[in-house]
Amino acid sequence: MKAKITIKDIAKELGVSSSTVSRALKNSPEISEETRKKVKAFADLYHYRPNMLAQKLRNNKTMVIGVIIPEIVHHFFSRVISGVEKIANGRDYNVMICLSNESYEKEKLNIQMMANGSVDGLLVSIAKETLEKGDFDHFKELKDYSIPLVLFDRISDKIDCDKVIVDDIGGGYKATKHLLDVGCKKIAILSTPDHVNVGALRTIGYKKALEESNIKVNNDLIFKVNDKSNITDQITTFMHNTTIEYDGIVAVNEIYAANVIKIAKEKDLQIPKDLCVVGFTDGLISSFSTPSLSTIDQHGITIGEHAAELLLDRIQNKEVYREYQRKVVSTDLIIRKSSEKNTDL
Amino acid sequence: MKAKITIKDIAKELGVSSSTVSRALKNSPEISEETRKKVKAFADLYHYRPNMLAQKLRNNKTMVIGVIIPEIVHHFFSRVISGVEKIANGRDYNVMICLSNESYEKEKLNIQMMANGSVDGLLVSIAKETLEKGDFDHFKELKDYSIPLVLFDRISDKIDCDKVIVDDIGGGYKATKHLLDVGCKKIAILSTPDHVNVGALRTIGYKKALEESNIKVNNDLIFKVNDKSNITDQITTFMHNTTIEYDGIVAVNEIYAANVIKIAKEKDLQIPKDLCVVGFTDGLISSFSTPSLSTIDQHGITIGEHAAELLLDRIQNKEVYREYQRKVVSTDLIIRKSSEKNTDL
């Protein structure tokens, strides 16, 4: 590899001071045109580049926002990133993404790395392991670095910052209400363990819809899928359990819902005749699965846009000691074949 | 926001020199224990953090590798990133990702941003617009920054660097050969415009398989999907064209293949009876679609692992003036329902 040429090297070569070179490169009128031309020609010849790292250090701005997401194979998070990119690019900011892979240690490392001079602010959706552990000190430390933080989707009340969330209770309610409306009587929910706020909140919405229809909540129909074990195996065990009867399933994400459709086929259950299904996240799997999957659209792009706006407002107006905001983005039900039970009625 | 406390601030407050503070924080024995304790207590109290940006500047290492991919909603790229993370983390490196969104300008901006002090090396899969434009100067400039580059999947022969590619000719060949083996006579290919190397190479493999079986290549059966327009509309037009007969389709990515299955159903074509389909990329859509999709597995994780290994070898052994390497990762055919035509024979 070729060593980088510095201002000092140019100065030495041309027999002038470093400050002359620096001013010549900035086209300062204090320097004679002849010297300016000579310096620039030399700099071009040896591919001199101003040391941006040193420049960043001086003006203390990176013009980059960092995003830390739990995983990349997830339609919702990729939509969020599209929204973030749209707002950030429109405000001349660039976006860098790191993955926590749902790991507490990795999330902590990512935050430290990004906060140490790579970004002006951070957007984070918390890793499942961190939520389970309940240790959020790595987020609190961001304040000492003066790095603004906005949490989205997976948040914690123990962290003081701007937050953008999906109306998860409303989403769980809408999904369940829809299944009741098409005639389902025994509706199950495939959720996450309780420490993951999104699953817990969707389950609250599910219970609310049932109670409004005077249906008693049956805890046997609330199944919490543990992402640390094989998802398909767990859902298969639940669906093949002969002591449990169900004619509708709310699945809190697209992968769970796709598994339900697959396992139902193996069980010779006809969808939607024998079993109606509603998932979450309007991704490619939902529209390409057979039957196509009814789903709760969480408007990932809108979430990303709101989160980036809140963050850039804090970055660009550091004086504003505005109270932390909490934006709630509502969801929409998209009805497809997997729940079109009563269309012939 | 609270201003960051600096070594200077601590020095002023305690009435000692900055150098004393700096050495005390590094636990230097040259400084009395009392002063060391006092400095550390003060630094803790005011949440002093060493300025990592300045430290990076001094030792010129970020311990981060950057990855620039064209898009995030793409199973192949997310697999590549898993492979990159695995190798990088194992060698104490962190990974930052930026998206080019298939845009030349965005790719250029990302490269400049990452090369300017955020990363020690770059892994890039080239944006379609850049390939079309044929302008690769932004890659060539990396040499002036002494930032090693490894290209993967979407590459160009005009850029001198290490490269990791999929055996795309072999993949196109295997997909086509398989369709011939199950009895297809008129095989179409849904490819990309020619400037995208992966589509062009898979088409070469397709032609090779046909020619080996003494089937004349029919250019009407080679359809190049333009990603700038609506994909579904283009594939629908092709598949509904009554002047073209086909009983097998090779689709060069998962989304094209999923569209073929969807449109075939609308046309009342039975898969695999009337039409056999093989896609590329063994993603979630392939296994969850009905019928499940036969596919060419491109081993994204392996590609990511090889690319990260080549890059880290260059970063960590800057002295090695080894010739640039070109690794070719072979593909595997995964047979599922969409091409199980002759299983009853």
Image (spheres, coloured by chain):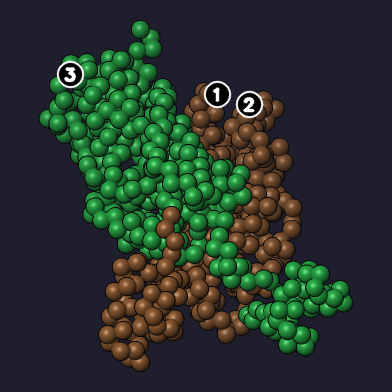
Chain colours: A brown, B green
For residue A40, side relative to residue A122 (left or right)? left
**Proximity of marks 2 and 3: CB atoms separated by less than 8 Å:** no
Q: Which mark is residue A267?
A: 1
Of the residues shown, which amino acid type is indicated by label 2?
Answer: His
Judging by the rendered image, the residue that carries numbered circle 3 is B215
Image quadrant where one finds the C terminus of chain A: top left
**Chain under numbered label 1:** A
Q: Position of residue B21 (x, y in %)?
A: 74, 78
Kindly report the distance in space between the C-alpha atoms of the residues bearing marks 2 and 1: 8 Å
**Proximity of marks 1 and 3: CB atoms separated by less than 8 Å:** no
Q: Nearer the viewer, residue A155 or A205?
A: A155
Image quadrant where one finds the N terminus of chain A: bottom left
Residue at 14 percent of width and 21 percent of height:
B216
Q: Nearer the viewer, residue A56 or A1?
A: A1
Of the residues shown, which amino acid type is indicated by label 3?
Answer: Ile
Task: Please check whether the numbered discs 1 and 3 fall on a single chain.
Answer: no
**Proximity of marks 2 and 1: CB atoms separated by less than 8 Å:** yes
Mark 3 Cα-neighbour bin, 10 Å: few <14, some 14–19, many ≥20: some
Task: Please check whether the numbered discs 2 and 1 fall on a single chain.
Answer: yes
Evaluate whether residue A296 shows in this view. Answer: no
Residue farthest along the left direction in this orientation: B243
Residue at 49 percent of width and 50 percent of height:
B319
For residue B332, which quarter of the picture? top left
